[in-house]
Image: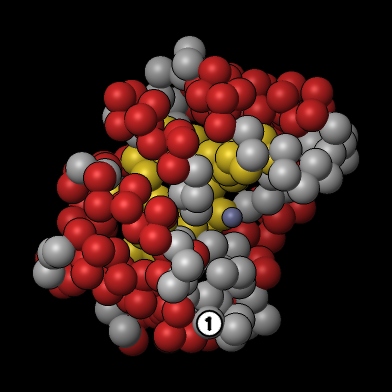
């Protein structure tokens, strides 16, 4: 199995968490960065850890921090499987929207140049996210999917749709309805750890091992066998990120 979205730099002991993930059959992790320093730390954490790939990017929350795209490009080149997470967050509005838009566009361009996938965070910005991605020709992963309104565009354009722990929450019926509609070759699962621990372990610090709960919940929602879905998600992620 794979956890397609883990903030390893947000965990107290990432190496121990990676070992616990392996012990429950989560042999692969895509480690996600949220800024330049986070990219450096995450690349260092992944070094020597088999099965851990890295995505480099600047989160929309950090859009006003003046992070340099040139520096990001230098860090990322040849070392990452995706640019992410990147996108737009008009819910929290931690950074001015104009700065978010510019940063998103710059990072989409970088992914195009590097030929990598993008991992997209979109919150309260469905329409603008869809518009910004219109001209991006590469692979798109919609992470921690929580915008059922964005689903028709995602399906039409062949984006990967990744579900996190919140799809397991009792009140998330609408999200599960969306999860049931994603075609088998486009569905992904993630923890988004250390946040959003799935239902059976809700309230704890999330970690890659817990993706098994999200996969189990998705399998139930989609009326599929959990082991088979786990294998399919792993294969989908390998295709999306060009993993070996
Ligand atoms: Zn994230």
Q: Above or below — where is 128 with respect to 217? A: above
Q: Nearer the viewer, residue 19 or 191?
A: 191
Give the quadrant of residue 103. Answer: top right
Q: Secondary structure at mark 1?
A: loop
Horizontal and vertical percent position of residue 9: 66, 66
Query: How packed is label 1: few (under 14 Cα within 10 Å), some, or many (20 or more)?
Result: some
- Left or right of 74 on screen, residue 111: left
Q: Is residue 110 left or right of residue 136?
A: right
The residue positioned 64% from the left and 39% from the top of the image is: 124
Position of residue 177 measured from the top left corner of the image (x, y, whole percent):
32, 52
The answer to whether residue 191 is visible is no
Count of labels shown? 1
User: Image check: 46 left or right of 117?
Assistant: right
Quadrant in the picture for the N terminus: bottom left
**What residue sits 48% from the left and 13% below the top?**
135
Outermost residue to the top: 135
In the depicted structure, whether residue 202 falls above or below residue 184: below
Q: Residue drawn at (50%, 50%), measured in percent from left and top?
A: 146
Q: Is residue 111 left or right of residue 25?
A: right
Residue sitting at x 54%, y 18%: 131
Residue 32, percent from left and from top: 56, 54
The quadrant where ligand 1 appears is bottom right
On whether ligand 1 comes within 8 Å of the CB at mark 1, the answer is no
The residue that disc 1 covers is 202
Q: Tell me where residue 10 appears, x and y as whole percent.
A: 67, 69
Up-down: is 220 above or below 124? below
Quarter of the figure with residue 189: bottom left
Q: Is residue 174 visible?
A: yes
């Amino acid at each position: 199995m794979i956890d397609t979205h883990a903030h390893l730099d947000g965990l107290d002991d990432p190496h121990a968490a990676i070992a616990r993930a392996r012990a429950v059959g989560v042999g692969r992790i895509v480690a996600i960065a949220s800024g330049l320093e986070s990219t450096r730390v995450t690349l260092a954490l992944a070094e020597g850890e088999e099965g851990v790939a890295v995505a480099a990017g600047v989160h929309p929350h950090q859009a006003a921090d003046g992070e340099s795209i040139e520096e990001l490009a230098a860090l990322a080149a040849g070392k990452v499987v995706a640019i992410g997470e990147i996108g737009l967050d008009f819910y929290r509005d931690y950074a001015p929207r104009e700065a978010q838009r510019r940063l998103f566009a710059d990072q989409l361009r970088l992914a195009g140049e590097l030929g990598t996938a993008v991992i997209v965070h979109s919150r309260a910005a469905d329409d603008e996210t869809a518009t910004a991605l219109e001209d991006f020709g590469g692979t798109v992963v919609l992470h921690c999917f929580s915008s059922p309104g964005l689903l028709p565009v995602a399906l039409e354009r062949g984006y990967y749709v990744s579900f996190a722990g919140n799809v397991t929450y009792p009140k998330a019926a609408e999200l599960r309805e969306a999860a049931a509609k994603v075609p088998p070759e486009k569905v992904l699962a993630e923890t988004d750890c250390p946040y959003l621990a799935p239902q059976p372990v809700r309230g704890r610090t999330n970690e890659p091992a817990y993706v098994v709960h999200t996969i189990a919940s998705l399998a139930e929602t989609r009326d599929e066998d959990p082991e088979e879905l786990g294998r399919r998600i792993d294969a989908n992620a390998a295709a999306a990120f060009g993993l070996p």
